[in-house]
Every structure is written in structure tokens, then in C-alpha cells.
Amino acid sequence: MSETEKIIKGIQFGLLSPDEIRKMSVGAIKSPDVYDEDGTPIEGSVLDPRLGVIEPGQKCPVCGNPMGVCPGHFGHIELVRPVIHVGFVKEIYDTLKATCRNCGRLKLRPEKGSTCEEFKSEEEELTLEKAYRILKAIKKRYPLAAKRLIDHVKKTAAKQEVCPHCCAKQYKIKIEKPYTFYEERKEGLVKLLPTEIRERLEKIPNEDAELLGFDPQYSRPEWAVLTVLPVPPITIRPSITIESGMRAEDDLTHKLVDIIRINNRLEESIRSGAPQLIVEDLWDLLQYHVATYFDNEIPGIPPAKHRSGRPLRTLAQRLKGKEGRFRGNLSGKRVDFSARTVVSPDPNLSINEVGVPIYVAKILTVPERVTKFNIERLRQAVINGPDKWPGANYVIRPDGRRIDLRYVKDRKELAASLTPGYIVERHLVDGDIVLFNRQPSLHRISMMAHKVKVLPGKTFRLNLLVCPPYNADFDGDEMNLHVPQSEEAIAEARELMLVEKNILTPRYGGPIIGAGQDFISGAYLLTVKTTLLTKEEAYTILGVSDYIGDLGEPAILAPNEYYTGKQIVSLFLPKDFNFHGTAKISSGPRACKTEDCPHDSYIVIKKGILLEGVFDKNAIGNQQPESILHWLIREYGDEYGRYLMDNLFKVFIRYAEMRGFTMTLDDITISEDAKSKTKELIKQHEEVVNDYMVKYNEGKLEPIPGRTLEESLENYILDTLDKLRNSAGEIAAQDLDPFNNVYVMARTGARGSVLNITQMAAMLGQQTVRGERISRGYLNRVLPHFKVNDKSPEARGFVYSSFRSGLNPIEMFFHAAGGREGLVDTAVKTSQSGYMQRRLINALSDIRVEYNGMVRTTYGDVIQVIYGDDGVDPMRSAHGKTFDVNRIIERVVGWKR
Amino acid sequence: MVSDQIKEYVSKKVEEYKEVIPENKLGELQSAIMSLEIDITPEEVDRIFELAKEEYLKSLVQPGEPVGIVAAQSIGEPGTQMTLRTFHFAGVRELNVTLGLPRLIEIVDARKTPSTPMMKIYLKEEYKNNVEKVLEIARRLEYTKVQNVVSSIDIDLANFALILTLDPDMMRDKGVSFSDVVSALKKLKLPEHEIEESEEENRITITFTNLSDIMTLFKLREKVLNAKIKGLKGIKRAIVRKEGDEYVIYTDGSDLAAVVELPEVDTTRIWTNNIFEIQKVLGIEAARAHIVREIKRVLDEQGLDVDYRHILIVADMMTRDGTVKQVGRHGVTGEKESILARAAFEVTVKHLLEAAIHAEKEEFVGVVENIIIGQPIRLGTGMVELTMRLTR
């Protein structure tokens, strides 16, 4: 390798002195014109060829490097009159105030005392020498304290009206934003010209400057007043050629031309002896241009505009903000070897895999070094070339030359010439490790490593179980894919980022990947008591798994042989696994706390055999800590977790397919009997509401302390209507068949809740905006359909209808109003929580665990002596606990219980 | 039942594992085994301890783990799932309390005062069951101004007098007697005046004897209205609620420093949601503990499961130098040593210009800086500084 690795140890910030600017410059830039008649850049203009190479194929006249290698070189402009650097106005102001206008010394009392009569100071006041001593002592160790000392020095010194060193009377200095200074002399306000300011700053001795926060070696105060302006290399302000052959210059180039033009005019005026007024006007104009060159958003002055009226994007604007250099290009970079497309589901893939379209696989490459072990395979890849998968796109010879296979005439010949030491950039093939990511990348599992599976089609495919960490669905989501290029990166990705190693989330120490939706329905249906499978059926559903082995004896032998679903599940469980616990369906009338459970809602697994209970969300669901799935992964490893999800979970789906699983209108239709009961309920509750309203009108309503009467009424009504909806829901829940598919989904936690069923079958209930009944719209009523000041439920957004029965137009309007709030809420929330997270990450990004278990920042500050008080990693913990005592006992003796 | 023999064996085992497993965990394990209702063999006890050791060692955090970033992500990620609204505090429908995302932001922002400050005041054993007494204390807390109990205030321009008509309903509600108002007025520093009381009519007339300026009279009217009768500044309302077997005072507004001075208050259980007051009155450790509790409370209330350790890191970072520091520009991030890290966060240009004037040096120690220049960061696998020497 010809490249040597260099490490940046540090960057010293500072001000450029005029001498230094001249020293690093390739020449003075004087010409305001950029091109001569035949369109070549003029030497001595802002596009001087010495400033860097702009056209491909050229060589830099200064360093001899071609484009892309030559970093560009600085030039300089000699300013005829000094101007103030806008960024340092505040510092200049503070410095002028704190130093003597005559002798330039810092106006602090010297230790030996002042010889001036008029000088007044209190005894305890800081002396110059003492301040200096303190600063020396604390500067290195306590930079923040030093900053405070400097502020104090500035404040004390600024108060002195007489210089303690030379006894000169001091005047108050005023500043007129953004960059004009005045002195309040006896004769009135006198403008301080930059020349005079610079002279004063020059007089400040080094020691005093240090006390004002300067570091004379790198930043002398007078350098904040510019006499020479560096001209940046063209590489940072390239001109662009539009199709018509017209050249468009960068904003910075425009600005520099402006500065040179005014500078030349100013020089001309001075030389020709123009009146002082004209000179000063031009000087001011020069100041304006230099100021906007640095920052074009200075408050108080109009921003410099392009001819089209667009404000120029000058230096500060380039750095600032989200799309600026720092956040846009340095903290977050664009990368090669990446792809992006729509994602779609594929339950046949392993959770570790990602389906990559063949088109993508032919463009993304992995550099593979030729060895005697892989030479035949790589030769074939080279022969296949860039268009036939699995081929290769580039070959890199040991001397570092890249050969583009698109332009190689005889690839067979090249393939034959491969020897160990060559590097082939071959196409992505099955088994390659790639990083897969979906934005917003809110946590580390938003980016995980997958193994490539090259597939036909144009979308990335992923296993449904991996949706929760990415928070992905398939309504058009797109995801990104990155190919690590070094062995080190590949190894790290595989060992740390692979999906199976991230099943447990560090957020709470539980599986974030696990069954959801149909997987849960399928698991429940398979494990429910009534499911009996013939041998053929058992084989059919086991066929999707990698299970090899005996089925065992059927649970039912006569009259026919039948296997239970529980037997199938048991085939996948480790032989020493014990578990006791409740299922999700164990609630309400079907709740169980012990093994003796008629509803099959208490799960018992002894020695790897599922004896009792159904598998539902509590057992295998995603984001369910302390579940069967969680313990299995914790105790038998990530790889076993992957095995379960790739095999057992597939069986669940297969069973659901075989049995059939759907939803019909009948599932959410309640009987006439229930309907009339609901009507009765509505009547009862309406009466209660009416009662409240009557009481309110009569002024007899008992107010809630701290609330107005009206607020209290609303509160009471909301409570009543909430009760109404709940009771209606209960009636519906009792009326519906608990084994209809919709109800099964809600009970097992596969999808939906009892509330959803209530809304579908019974009634939607109260629609709210900002937690209150909907009351805005027309004057004292929501819609013209109601009487003014009607406070009845239906006039304030109570929806009696269910989704099954359909909403009337007014109800639909209310529903839409409530729904709209949710949308607005989400929009606001994402921006707020996004910002909060950015701040948290920025504040905590440097914290790590040391080898001795201490938590420190990379700067060495101790944050915790032992991480989290017990040194336990949440991801490896048992839902936050170091280990679960009862679980450990269960593991050993659970089979006895 | 576990036999005595086994019990002895377990105790021996506990002794044996003392060096490996933390003591509290061992204790938990011991008592769990002791209370088993099934037979257990010594071999099984051995296995249990073996597993405990194995699980403990496996669960330890690995060196290099970027615990800060993981903590930030674990708290930030569920942010999108939180509500935006202010809710009625669990069961107390009288008070509005900021919860959810806005409250979380408020905590990490380290605001001087929360948007809905409130206190929960428990009382000492001898008072906590006495409703009358508790109500009396609550009333004493409520900051009541003359304004709150007058039904009208009239200005008699002819006599330069202020005529206050008191509202008996409001007075009863606030627990203020006529004489309380009068004594509050007497305490005021008013120019030469006479006070005429008429308790039957609920009227107080203040006549200024030596006044000629009407503008001053108007100003005095304001002064009279704002006169404090009783209570603690900052506590707008106090509500008594029964909680379990005792009565608790909830307040709208917070003044910890003053409330802890009250003799009836159980200072060991007092609670406020103002973190700065806690820092001032009880110190930084209390503030740290409180940040943890408040964040945990907000997350729990929203049903979000976030490990305790993540919250600890945030609180430790916020309080590490003895004062509560904001997570952000004016706190933790703003005080980073690295110029580039600060510039990359917010107010880019200012940080760069300051660095130039003060000739600061960027050392490339932190994460952000190293990402900016494309060097490996010193977390995780990037922390390893030892490399193998490959001999040819």
C-alpha cells in the first residue's frame, strides 16, 4: 500500500496575522475582472490558476498535482484601509473598554500601587499581577474557571476612568451595531476608525492580552482588525458551467470580486486625494463587503444579494445549520456502497437474512483478496463480468491499479492472470454481510447486519419478525443497505450487529423481536386444546421447519391417531426447559393462577414439554419481557432464538394458513337482544346527563373544587358518557362468541383490543379535542344542525353508532375532528422528541465503560463508579434484574412443581 | 418443604459464592430457596448456584460499551410514543399536571420552574388522620391576597378613600376571617390613613388623610389588593385528599423551602416536582435522585418500559459538577471541551470564532470530533489500543 495512515492529534485554533496571511499566499489578488477576452482566467484575479486546479487534466502550477490531489492554495488581498472582522466586534469592544486608550495597558491596579492621583480603587480589588498569577495557575486545569476570571478582569478594568499606569483619562466607548465604534469625549461622540482601533490594540502588551483571553502566540488583539484578507483556494468555491457554456461563479467568488473592486476604488480615491467624506464612504462600503463576506446574516445590515435577488451564501452560512458543513457534511456523510429501495415481506427468509434484488447485487461489490482458496471462484466472477451475476465489477492489481471490467475486452485472459495478491471487487452474493437500516434511526437496532440472499424482484425483502426494531411496515417504506468493505468491518458487523444478536433490546432487556399479529393467532390456534392434527397434517406444518426427528407417540390413539398442537410445539423446546406462567388470555372470566385451569390459560412446561396452556402474546410476543421466548433466548442463546423464529414461528404461520384465518362482519355483529340492552343503557345514561344539566341550570350542581361550574359539568358528563361506552362494550363483549376470530385476535394480543371491538360492534363513544368535548365551530354550537348552547351528548361529539352500523354524517364529522387532532399531535411530537433525542445523544455520546467497570467520558471524567450501581448491562439483564431468582429455581426444579 | 439439612447446605453455599455474586442477590436467592414448597436435593441446590453465577457473569456490562448513547436512545426512542397533552394527575381531577413528552423535555431542559409546579405534602403521625387539622394547614398554605376575598373595591374620590367590600363566600372558602383582612391591611405601609371597620356589612374603608393626588390613590388601590393575608408565595391552591388511611395536601405551586419549615409536615416524605427547589433545599444528591424518579414516573405513567440504568446515566450527567445542568446548549453539551463537538451541535459560528480568539486547541478525544475528521471513535471496539505484532 502506498498510503500511510496519519492520525490527526489536534487542531490549534487562532487568528491569522497579516504576516502569516501573506506568507501562505501564492500572490496578491488585485484584478476585479476574472476572465480576459478569450475566456481564460486572469492571473491576479480571484480565479488565478495558482489558487488551484479547476479543470480536469490540468496540473497545478504551484504544487504540480492534478485535480483532486491539489488541495488548492490561498491568495491574499491587501486592504487599503483596515476593516473590522465582524465576528470579533464583541471582543474588540471588551478589549477597548478594558485597556488604556493612551498606553494600551490593562486598567488593573498594579501591585506596587498607582502613581496617579485621580486613580481610585478599593483595597481588596484584584491587582494586575495577582490576576496574572491566578490565570497562569488555573488556565490548563480549569478552563471554565479561567473564563470566569477573564470576565471578571474585563469587568473590573472597564470600570476605571483613569489609567492606573499612565494616568490618562479614559472615555466611555460606545458601539453602534454592527461594527462602528464611538468614543464619548468632551466634544461629543467621536467615531473611532478601524485604523485607530488597530493602533490601540497593537499597544496592548502580551501579558495584558492574555488576561483578556487572547493567546499572543496564536491570537493578538490587533489581528481581529484586518489589513490583509486571505483569498481561499478555488477548490472551495468552484465555478460551474451550465449547458449553454455560461459559467456561473460561486457566491464567495462574487463576494471577493466585490471586495477587490471597492478596495481598488478606495485606493484610487485616496491616491487622487478625494475628499475625506468620499474616502470614508468607500471605506465603509469596504467594511460592509468584508463583513458580509464572513457572515451574510448580520442583524442590522441588509444582506448582500445576488443579481437575482437571492441572498448570498457566504462563509458563516456555509457552516451553519442542519444542511451546513458541520451537521450536513462532517457529522453525517454521504457514502458509497449503499442502496435504497422499497421493502416487502418474505416469511420464508431467516430473520438474519435480507432479500436483495439481483439488480442491486450486481452494482454493490465486496473487495475480496485473491488467495489460493478462492481463486477459482473469483476467476469465474471475473469471467462473468459486471453484467452477469455473480460476477465482478473491478479488479485491483497488486500495484494498486484498478481495472474496470466493463471495458476489459477479454475477461477470460484477465481471469487467467489473477494470482494471490489481486483484489476482486465481486458482486454481492448469498451470505455476504450487509448493514440494513430504516430511518428515523432512533436506536441502535434501527441498523442491523443481515446476511444477503439475492432474489429476483426489485424490493428488499425482510422477515416480518424483524419489523419491530426497524419500526417498519410495508405500506411503501423504503430502507437502506450498506456493504462493509473491510474484513474488520465485516467481522464487527457479523459479531455485534447481526439480527440474532439483537433480539434483546438494551432499552429494557427483553425481546424486541418476537411474534406479532398472525404469528400469535397461529400459535394460539395451534396450541389451543381443540386442535388435533392427523399425522399428515402434523407433517405438513412441520415441513416448513428444519425439524428432523421423531414425532413421538400421538396424544390420542383411538379411534384415530391425533397429535395435539402442544406436542408439535414441544418438539422445538429444549429438553430441560421448565416454565410456569399465565397466558395473555388469562383475564376476566378466563383468568387462572394455578395449574388447575379449565380455560387452558395457565402455561406449564416441564422438561421441554408443553403440558398445559396456550401460546399467545404473553408467551412468544414481541416486546414482552420475562416471557417464555425471553427466557429461552436468555438461557439457550441467540442462535437458538433465531432457530425458534426461523422454524417454530414458521410452523405457526403454516398452521394458520392450513386452518384458515379471516374476519367476517358476523364477528363484530351483536344480537338484537344485546342491541336493545344497549339502547336501554343509552337511555339510562342520557337521563343522568340530563340530570346534571338540569342541576347545572338551576345552579344546584356541586362544583369540583378548583373548577368552575361549567368545567365541573363537563367533567361529570364526560365521566358518565365514558361509563356508557364501557358498559356498552361489556354487553358487546359478552354477546360475541369468544372464539370468533376477531375476538381471538384481541384476547391473544395478536391485533386489536377490547376497545377496538367495542367501537366496531357497540359504539364509538365520545370524540374529544384536547381532552374536551367538541364545542367549537359556529357561535355556541358546533354545527348548524343543533340548537344554540345545546350541551347534549350528540351535539358535543358523542357517537352512538358503531363502525358496524355506520356513522351518520354528523357523527362522521365529529369523528374526523377527533382524528385530525391525532394527526396534528403526531406531527408536533416527532419534531419535539427528535430534538430532545438529538440533545440527549450529544450530551451523552462520550460515555463508555472502562476495562475496570467504571463509567467515564472519553475525556476521563468519572460519571459512575460502577455502571448502573450493579455493573449489569440492561440488554443482558433479566428485564432489568441481574438475574431472576425465581426463574433460576424454576429452571432447576420447575419440573417438580 | 425444605429440610433443615438443605437449609444448612444452602447457607454454606451462600458463604461459598459470596465472592462471586452480589450479596443482596444471594440473599434473595437464599430466601427464595428456603420458602420453596417442594423437595430439593443438594445437587439441585448446587445447580441453582451454578446457574446464578453463570447468569450473573454473563449479564455484566462489557468494557467499551457506549452506555451514554444507549441511554440517550433508550429514552429518546419512546418519545414518539408519548402523549403531548397535560393530564389530570392520577385521580386528582382538581389539578392539572404536565406529563408525557412536555414534562420529559422540561426535566432534561432543567427549567428553573416547571410549567405546572405542584407539591404533595404528607403530615406527621399526629395530624395525618385529622381532617379538620389537615384542612386548616392546607388553608394556611394557600397564598391569599386581599384581591381574592373582596367582592368589590370602590374609590371615593371626594374623601380619598378606598372602600373594600368583602365576599363572605370567598372568605369562608379561603378560611379568612374579617380580622385577618384588617390585620393584613394594618401591616401594609400606607401613607397616613384611617381604617374604619364594619364587620356586619363586611366593609372596610381606608381613608387617606393627607393625600391630594388621584394617581397615587389608584396605585394604593393596587397595593391594597395585592396585600398578602396569609399563605406561602407560590402556592396558589391547596387541596386535601384522602390517600390510604391518611390525608395528604396537594398544592398547585411549590415552595419547598417554606413548607419544610412547617412543624406539622412530615419532611421525610414531602414531594415537589420542582427540581431546582430540591437542589437548593436538599442538595445535589437529592436533586439527582429526584431527576431519576421524575423521569421514571413520566415513562411509567405512559406505560413505557425503560431500564433504570439509562435514566441514572442521564441524571448523573446532569448533576455531575454539583449543580443541575441542562441537557443541551447551556449545559452538558455547551461545556464540552471539544470545539468541533460544540460547533456541530448548535450555534456553530460562535464557537469557532471564540475558539480562534482564545486560541483553543481541539484534542480529538470525544466521539463527535473524531467522526467529523473520519477517525475511529474511542468507544466499543474503537477503544482497543492494543494491536498484535505480526511476525513475518
Image: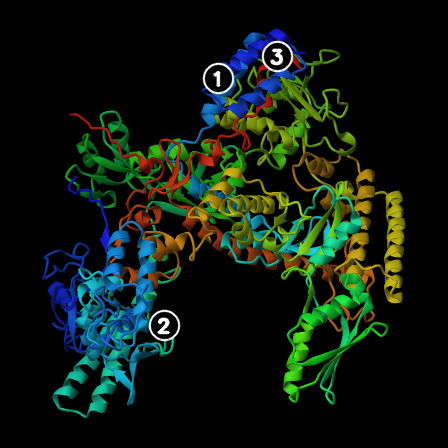
* Residue A798, percent from left and from top: 78, 57
- Mark 3 surroundings within 10 Å by alpha-carbon count, few (fewer than 14), some (14 through 19), many (20 or more): few
Residue under label 3: A552
Q: Residue at x 29, y 88 (%)?
A: A186
Residue B90 seen in the current view: yes
Quarter-of-image position of residue A766: bottom right
Quarter-of-image position of residue B292: top right
Q: Are marks 2 and 3 in contact (CB under 8 Å)?
A: no
Of badges 2 and 3, nearer the viewer stands: 2
Residue under label 1: B17
Q: Amino acid at mark 1?
A: Tyr
Q: Amino acid at mark 3?
A: Gly
Q: Residue at x 77, y 50 (%)?
A: B133
Picture quarter with the N terminus of chain A: top left
Q: Nearer the viewer, residue A226 or A620?
A: A226
Instruction: Establish if A306 lies above or below A616.
Output: below
A682 to the left or right of B374: right
A684 to the left or right of A772: right
Instruction: Establish if A875 lies above or below A802.
Output: above
Q: Earlier in the sequence, mark 2 or mark 3?
A: 2
A798 to the left or right of B5: right
Residue A571 seen in the current view: no
Q: Amino acid at mark 2?
A: Glu
Residue under label 2: A297
In the structure shown, which secondary structural element does the residue marked by tag 1 occupy?
helix
In the structure shown, which secondary structural element does the residue marked by tag 2 occupy?
loop
* Residue B110, percent from left and from top: 50, 54
Q: Residue lying farthest bottom?
A: A275
